[in-house]
Image (cartoon, coloured by chain):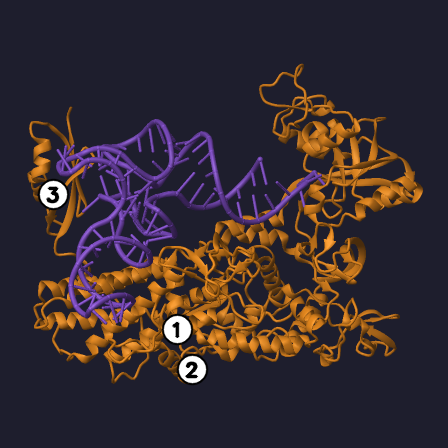
RNA sequence: GCGAGAGUGGCGGAACGGUAGACGCAGUCGACUCAAAAUCGACCGACGAAAGUCUUGUGGGUUCGAAUCCCUCCUCUCGCACCA
């Protein structure tokens, strides 16, 4: 077990992080090291580093520690490289957990949230992050959400927000709309009540207006992970096809045509039915005329809108008895079904079924015994014998059984079919998108109020600017289901700003994703009177490096990209893309432990004995060690960052997190790993401590002749500078750490050399000084503590110093070891001066005893020499 | 099913087409100690007494030379998925 840091009487000097870390944090704060200007005038290039801001749940977890450590390394490194850095922090403070706390424990959501923020801020401050805390804000502060209300009204004026009816997941017990991911097995996640599909009037932001641009611009996000771009591309879901109207054989209720979207107009002649979504208007007409149809529609409705639910469901349909005419075959008509697998939200909510060339249609046709006519012949297949059994043929081919399309290939047939539809005026080629408009209404209290007023005479009226912000009332009750804003006795009753008559406020609040869709822009000028100071944003935006979890790959990142465009088009911003660089970190995992009682145990509750068994600390009973998986409260495999910082300080967990593995992968938190990091902290500190008590040699590095040992150490130092720099640039933090271990090892090696060697003493100072500065992005407190020992008179903090430069002349080795291969196999090595002439190298290689033995009596066909690396002899026979 | 990524010692991992396994963790032995911790030193892929042979998921290919490039297959992880 690692010792605590309290130094004992006879112990070697130990780094007292408990005293040092708060001291350096105060020093950075007092000197304003991490303050940024809204519009800097220092002439430095800008660099905006941002980590996804946290939800104030009450305590930080290791995922936060990893996220903010990664960001801090980037911020500190870039600052040292001469950038003017913006590195802010705030709180994604609206959301359901606060309301749950209110319901369960009677705490007001605001009080609960602000208390959580206070304790989490203190935790983050103990980490020693180079944040500009003067820019901090919480989205639940009216100073923030009031600005958001202004933005919304601008979007409304620009036609980018609109109110319309939509199908939603409705929890009848909680009286609220649920997001898709809050519907579990068709039931509300909290109430357990079966979720209904309900049509409600909702606010939508028109993200679909930007679909083409959001898709096209993905190609330019070259500092985003490929997989995130792919996910967004899929989500936006562009497809090319045709829209066409099928006319009903006999119109009902004035409806004469059904619009259908298809990507396969070439297969029109293989049609065997038309299918409607259960929510389709024509399905409603059918339901009104036929109780059986109504029952089927009701059954589908009770299934919920969750795509996962639909997927699991069996394909079911109901024949309405209606028939439609074929666009190209006069006289031919086809049945109109209502089918549970047709999505109202995609395309037109109606499809034509071509079972031979679509798997879903085929399953449906087989179930209800509908015709299956192949119209596309696969390459090489025989028209007479080709048939479709249980697998539809969806590939390209040659058209058959298709009238004027016969003989064309699929692509030509698509064009010809579209032309045919266009000539008749019943269809056209269209581009369709999977992306839907963003429904932002939530029937909740703890969110940003949507700033509009509903008036019986004037309709929807925006809240006038001078009445903003619309502030949440504080006196709310959570004693019954539904939205407290709606139940509030007075809040919603207002006068219409237009006609002065009695009116009501909108009681819905915004989806919290709205809050996080522009916070990065607000950070540029967090106290501005307007939502965004355009001047500040022009300087700082876009975010140069955004860092966060992959779980936000689609929603948050797509919403933010949309919102940034919308803000550009409403005059608030000048950029379209919010995040020029994106880094997605891996999760933090840990072993899980389970006692004989079947209960999970926290890592802090167990102990690993010398014999490798793991026991319960309290009872001494053996516990079984389970899988390594993502830290979660339910598995109790979490480690509390605060406890770790209390025991080891902040630098140790920072170092361990960075050293363990590449940051994009999942890391495993282990006690041994942290303990190892702590040992290194102490070891490095001792290096500085030892040097600091020695005399400081003042020598002229230009004229002194360094000993071999000194030259070796200087080379190690400068190689470390170069290698660490390169690694940090590439986000290879684990490699940077490895190079720093090497430098520390090289210093330790040099310490064993003669103490009389003045040049070596100087080289050791240079090495330790470089080490102190190179660790500064990762272990900033230790770095300062070492530096001040080496430079007691310094006026500067490491946080204010430029990054060290490697001297290129010192990087080259005095001798290089070349591998000598015979027929590609390593047979020996030779030492040569760097860049030695080929002749000399080859001669030396041939003379190498083992090589000479193998070459004896053989004819050398080819001699390969890669300078400073390798020699390879190819021999005959 | 589709898409993306990954397979290297006991573990995490390193490696511009050029000495595979840097660095760390774990482990073994030793020094110091009454002892332990801490610290320091040595060892640490497999087989072999050694010379040496083998070794980066599998099988092939390109190359003087492949963890790295190309193809086949296998496994794992993540994401998406009735999108017409």
Does dot 2 land on a helix, a strand or a loop? helix
Estimate the spatial distance between the alpha carbons at disc 3 and disc 2, rounded to whole Å.
Answer: 58 Å
Front-lying residue, A470 or A607? A607
Q: Earlier in the sequence, mark 3 or mark 1?
A: 1
Residue A248 higher or lower than A453, as above or below: above
Q: Are marks 3 and 2 in contact (CB under 8 Å)?
A: no
Q: Position of residue A257 (x, y in %)?
A: 84, 40
- Which of the 4 quarters of the picture holds residue A724? bottom left
User: Is residue A483 toward the left or the right of residue A558 in the image?
Assistant: right
Estimate the spatial distance between the alpha carbons at disc 3 and disc 1, rounded to whole Å.
Answer: 54 Å
Front-lying residue, A84 or A555? A555
- Please state the chain letter of the residue tagged with numbered disc 3 in the rendered image: A
Name the residue rendered at 42%, 82% in the picture.
Answer: A29
Residue A704 higher or lower than A622, as above or below: below
Q: Are marks 2 and 1 in contact (CB under 8 Å)?
A: no
Name the residue rendered at 24%, 80% in the picture.
Answer: A791
In the rendered image, residues at marks 2 and 1 fall on the same chain: yes
Residue A129 visible within the image? no
Q: Which residue is mark 2?
A: A29
Colour-to-chain, purple: B
In this rendering, the label closer to the viewer, 3 or 1: 1
Q: Position of residue A196 (x, y in %)?
A: 79, 53
Q: Which residue is mark 3?
A: A838
Estimate the spatial distance between the alpha carbons at disc 2 and disc 1, rounded to whole Å.
Answer: 18 Å
In this rendering, the label closer to the viewer, 2 or 1: 1
Front-lying residue, A26 or A862? A26
Q: Which mark is residue A649?
A: 1
- Please state the chain letter of the residue tagged with numbered disc 2 in the rendered image: A
For mark 1, does the 10 Å Cα neighbourhood hold few (<14), some (14 to 19), or many (20 or more) residues?
A: many
């Amino acid at each position: 077990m690692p010792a605590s840091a309290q130094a004992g009487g006879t112990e070697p000097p130990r780094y007292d992080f408990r005293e040092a870390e708060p001291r350096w944090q105060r020093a950075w704060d007092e000197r304003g090291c991490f303050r940024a200007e809204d519009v800097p005038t220092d002439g430095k290039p800008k660099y905006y580093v941002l980590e996804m801001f946290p939800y104030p749940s009450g305590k930080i977890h290791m995922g936060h520690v990893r996220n903010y450590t990664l960001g801090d390394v980037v911020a500190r490194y870039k600052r040292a490289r001469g950038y003017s850095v913006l590195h802010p922090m705030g709180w994604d403070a609206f959301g359901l957990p606060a309301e749950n706390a209110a319901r369960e424990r009677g705490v007001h959501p605001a009080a609960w949230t602000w208390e959580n923020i206070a304790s989490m801020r203190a935790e983050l401050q103990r980490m020693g992050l180079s944040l500009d805390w003067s820019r901090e804000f919480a989205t639940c502060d009216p100073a923030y959400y009031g600005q958001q209300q202004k933005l919304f009204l601008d979007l409304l004026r620009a036609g980018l927000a609109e109110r319309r009816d939509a199908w939603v997941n409705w929890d009848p017990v909680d009286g609220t709309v649920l997001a898709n991911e809050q519907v579990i097995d068709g039931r509300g996640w909290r109430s357990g009540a079966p979720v209904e599909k309900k049509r409600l009037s909702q606010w939508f932001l028109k993200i679909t207006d930007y679909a083409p641009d959001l898709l096209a611009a993905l190609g330019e996000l070259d500092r985003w992970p490929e997989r995130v771009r792919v996910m967004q591309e899929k989500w936006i879901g562009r497809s090319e096809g045709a829209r066409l109207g099928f006319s009903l054989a006999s119109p009902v209720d004035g409806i004469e045509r059904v619009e259908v979207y298809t990507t396969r107009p070439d297969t029109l002649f293989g049609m065997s039915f038309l299918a409607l979504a259960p929510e389709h208007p024509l399905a409603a007409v059918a339901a009104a005329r036929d109780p059986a149809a109504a029952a089927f529609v009701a059954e589908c409705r009770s299934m919920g809108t969750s795509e996962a639910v639909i997927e699991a469901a069996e394909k079911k349909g109901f024949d309405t008895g209606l028939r439609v005419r074929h666009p190209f075959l006069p006289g031919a008509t086809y049945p109109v079904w209502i089918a549970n697998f047709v999505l109202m939200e995609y395309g037109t909510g109606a499809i034509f079924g071509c079972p031979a060339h679509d798997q879903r249609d085929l399953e449906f046709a087989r179930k209800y015994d509908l015709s299956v006519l192949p119209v596309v012949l696969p390459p090489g297949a025989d028209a007479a014998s080709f048939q479709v059994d249980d697998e539809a043929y969806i590939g390209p081919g040659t058209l058959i059984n298709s009238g004027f399309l016969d003989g064309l290939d699929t692509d030509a047939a698509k064009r010809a079919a579209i032309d045919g539809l266009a000539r008749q005026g019943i269809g056209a080629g269209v581009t369709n998108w999977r992306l839907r408009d963003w429904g932002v209404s939530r029937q909740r209290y703890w969110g940003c109020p949507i700033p509009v007023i509903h008036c019986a005479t004037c309709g929807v009226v925006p809240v006038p600017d001078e009445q903003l912000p619309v502030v949440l009332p504080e006196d709310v009750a959570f004693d019954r289901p539904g939205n407290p804003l709606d139940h509030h006795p007075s809040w919603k009753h207002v006068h219409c700003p237009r006609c002065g008559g009695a009116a009501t406020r909108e009681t819905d609040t915004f989806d919290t994703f709205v809050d996080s869709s522009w916070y990065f822009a607000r950070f540029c000028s967090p106290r501005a009177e307007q939502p965004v100071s355009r001047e500040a944003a022009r300087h700082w935006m876009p975010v140069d490096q955004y860092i966060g979890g992959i779980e936000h790959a689609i929603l948050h990142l797509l919403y933010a990209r949309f919102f940034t465009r919308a803000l550009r088009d409403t005059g608030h911003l000048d950029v379209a893309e919010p995040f020029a660089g994106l880094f997605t970190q891996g999760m933090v995992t840990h072993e899980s432990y389970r006692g004989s009682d079947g209960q999970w145990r926290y890592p802090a509750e167990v102990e690993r004995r010398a014999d490798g068994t793991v026991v319960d600390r309290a009872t001494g009973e053996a516990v079984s060690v389970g899988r390594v998986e993502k830290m979660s409260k339910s598995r109790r495999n979490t480690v509390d960052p605060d406890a770790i910082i209390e025991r080891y300080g902040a630098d140790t967990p920072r170092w361990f997190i960075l050293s363990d593995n590449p940051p994009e992968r999942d890391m495993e938190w282990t006690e041994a790993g942290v303990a190892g990091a702590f040992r290194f902290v102490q070891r490095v500190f001792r290096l500085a401590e030892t040097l600091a008590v020695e005399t400081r040699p003042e020598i002229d590095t230009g004229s002194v002749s360094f000993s071999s040992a000194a030259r070796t150490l200087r080379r190690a130092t400068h190689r470390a500078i170069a290698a660490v720099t390169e690694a940090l640039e590439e986000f290879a933090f684990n490699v940077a750490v490895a190079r720093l271990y090497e430098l520390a090892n090289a210093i330790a090696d040099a310490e064993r050399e003669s103490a009389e060697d003045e040049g070596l003493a100087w080289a050791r100072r240079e090495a330790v000084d470089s080490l102190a500065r190179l660790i500064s992005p990762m272990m900033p407190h230790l770095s300062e503590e070492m530096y001040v020992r080496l430079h007691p008179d310094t006026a500067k903090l490491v946080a204010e110093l430029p990054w060290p430069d490697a001297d290129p002349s010192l990087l080259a080795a005095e001798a290089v070891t070349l591998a000598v291969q015979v027929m590609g196999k390593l047979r020996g090595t030779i030492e040569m001066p760097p860049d030695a002439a080929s002749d000399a190298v080859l001669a030396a290689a041939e003379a190498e005893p083992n090589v000479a033995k193998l070459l004896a009596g053989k004819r050398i066909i080819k001699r390969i020499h890669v300078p400073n690396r390798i020699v390879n002899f190819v021999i005959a026979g």
